[in-house]
Amino acid sequence: MTQFSESELTEAVVKSFDNTPSPRAKFLLQELVKSLHDYVSKTGLTFEEWDYAIDFLTRTGQKCTNTRQEFILLSDVLGVSMLVDAVNHRDRGGATETTVLGPFYVGEHKVAAHGTDISPHNLTGEKMFVQSRVTDLNGKPLANVPVDVWHADDDGFYDSQKPNYDEIGASARARFITDDDGRFFFRTILPCSYPIPTDGPVGEMIMQTSRHPMRPAHVHFLVNAKGYEPLITHVFIGGDKYLDSDVVFGVKDELIAKVEKRTDPAMPDGGKAAAPWHLMTYEFHLKPGNGLAPKPLGVKVAEHA
Ligand SMILES: [Fe+2]
């Protein structure tokens, strides 16, 4: 048995991955070992702290269910999700900015007709009409593109967080298909800023470190056009007080929409409206790509129809 010094130990573990068949896997594992060892050495990590970290990660895994992803939340609040996003989207070239997927994308969204109210169970929120268009970088409309949308209710919770989710099903969550002019539109309610879940280990860390758990109000969009780079982003409600301190660091200036408060008796498609209501207008511009969404952070995304 060989006895290693601290630096020899790191070298030995790195070397132990030398025969990994995949060059990329070998590189990722060896760099991971170097970063982890560097962290332990630099901090002089104690047994108690190591034990706490193991327990924290164990509880993070135990908190995950089919509709809750505590590890994505952990990645989000540590800024890792936004860093992965940044290194993979360095040159936007005029395409719409990207941001985190977040932990509330729960997979396949049902197709809804344009104009559908996707929050029919919400009786308290102020109505919002969302009108949008998907184009390429030259402004050419992209037809027949699936666009998934999802957002929190006016009480700050996503449908998948509610105890009666299995009975009521999807709410404030749907898929729209763009028309010949690249357009789609729908009704919903104005979402509000909301706290990330604070009843798990990630929330515990946020509260114990005197950070606030809030995200500014937003609507998530996943635009997946054949022949273009998939776009995962949010559109934020302009004026929200948490735009400058999003707990997951997801805000980009270009993604902040001016949402107008309206009192007109009709919405843009002619349907009656009770005042006040809100109008969100936002266009998405896609850059050419391979057309199929990768599995973002392990979440299954349907292929282009
Ligand atoms: Fe969200």
Image (cartoon, rainbow, N blue to C red):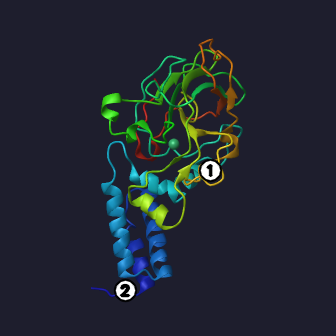
Residue 179 image offset from top left, x and y in percent: 58, 16
Q: Amino acid at mark 2?
A: Phe
Residue 150 image offset from top left, x and y in percent: 49, 34
Residue 4 image offset from top left, x and y in percent: 37, 86
Residue 259's disc number:
none
* Residue under the point 59% across and 14% down: 272
Is residue 233 at least partly visible in the picture? no
Q: Quadrant of residue 231?
A: top right
- Which-is-in-front pick, marks 2 and 1? 1
Q: Is residue 277 above or below residue 165?
A: above
Nearest to the observer: residue 63 or residue 88: 63
Q: Quadrant of residue 49?
A: bottom left
Disc 2: CA contacts within 10 A as few (<14), some (14-19) or many (>=20): few
Nearest to the observer: residue 218 or residue 289: 218
Disc 1: CA contacts within 10 A as few (<14), some (14-19) or many (>=20): some
Regarding mark 2 in the picture, which secondary structure is present there? loop
Query: Could you tell whether 56 is left or right of 177 in the image?
Result: left
* Residue under the point 39% across and 60% down: 201
Q: Quadrant of residue 12?
A: bottom left
Give the spatial CA distance, label 2 vs label 1. 50 Å
- Mark 1 lies on residue: 242
Is residue 77 at least partly visible in the picture? yes
Regarding mark 1 in the picture, which secondary structure is present there? loop
Question: Which numbered disc flags the more N-terminal residue, 2 or 1?
Answer: 2
- Mark 2 lies on residue: 4
* Residue under the point 45% across and 75% down: 37
Q: Is residue 158 above or below residue 4?
A: above
Residue sitting farthest toward the left: 1
